[in-house]
Amino acid sequence: MRKAAVLVLPLLLGGCAVWGPEGGPSGTGQAAPSAAASTAGEATAGTDGVQRITVTVDDQLRFSPSVVRARTGTIEFTIRNTGATPHTFGVLSERIDNVNGGDSRTLRVTVDRPGTYPFPCAYHVSSGMKGTLEVR
């Protein structure tokens, strides 16, 4: 029985490292990024009328840009993870789960009304990993 416990313990502890420094969904969180860390970016309309922007996520638990500005219409987000920690990205009722380290995923939403819409990482929101879509 003791051998089984010795073999299982490293597996259990190793799985915790995937969440990053805040400890996962029920973790206590790490300090939120400072206000100076906030960045803004403009979604650029293509010839097809779709507005596009790339948002980078990393092991520092932040979105870059953390504020995305766009107009009403279709907005396509490319989420690029430059770190090793998995993240999620969601805005309105659409969501991408598990953007793993080194991966990129795309999410397309249509926004009919001006307003401010949050986009948190479900895994790291308690650590301050959230951004804002500003639609005018």
Image (spheres, rainbow, N blue to C red):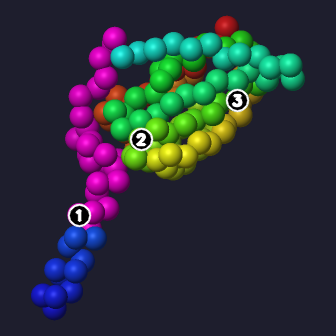
Q: Which residue is mark 1?
A: 13
Q: Which residues are magenta?
A: 12-36
- Residue indicated by mark 2: 83
Residue at 28% from the left image edge and 57% from the top image edge: 16
- Residue 73: in sight, yes or no? no
Numbered disc 1: secondary structure: helix
Name the image quarter holding the C terminus.
top right
**Callout count:** 3
Q: Could you tell me the amino acid type at mark 1?
A: Leu
Residue 78, located in which quarter of the rendered image? top right
User: Is 27 located above or below residue 1 in the figure?
Assistant: above
The nearer-to-camera label among 1 and 2 is 2
> Height in image: 10 above or below 88?
below
Mark 1 to mark 3: distance in Å? 37 Å
Name the residue tied to disc 3. 76
Q: CA distance from mark 1 to mark 2?
A: 20 Å
> How far, Cα to Cα, is label 3 from label 2?
22 Å
What secondary structure is the magenta-colored segment mainly?
loop
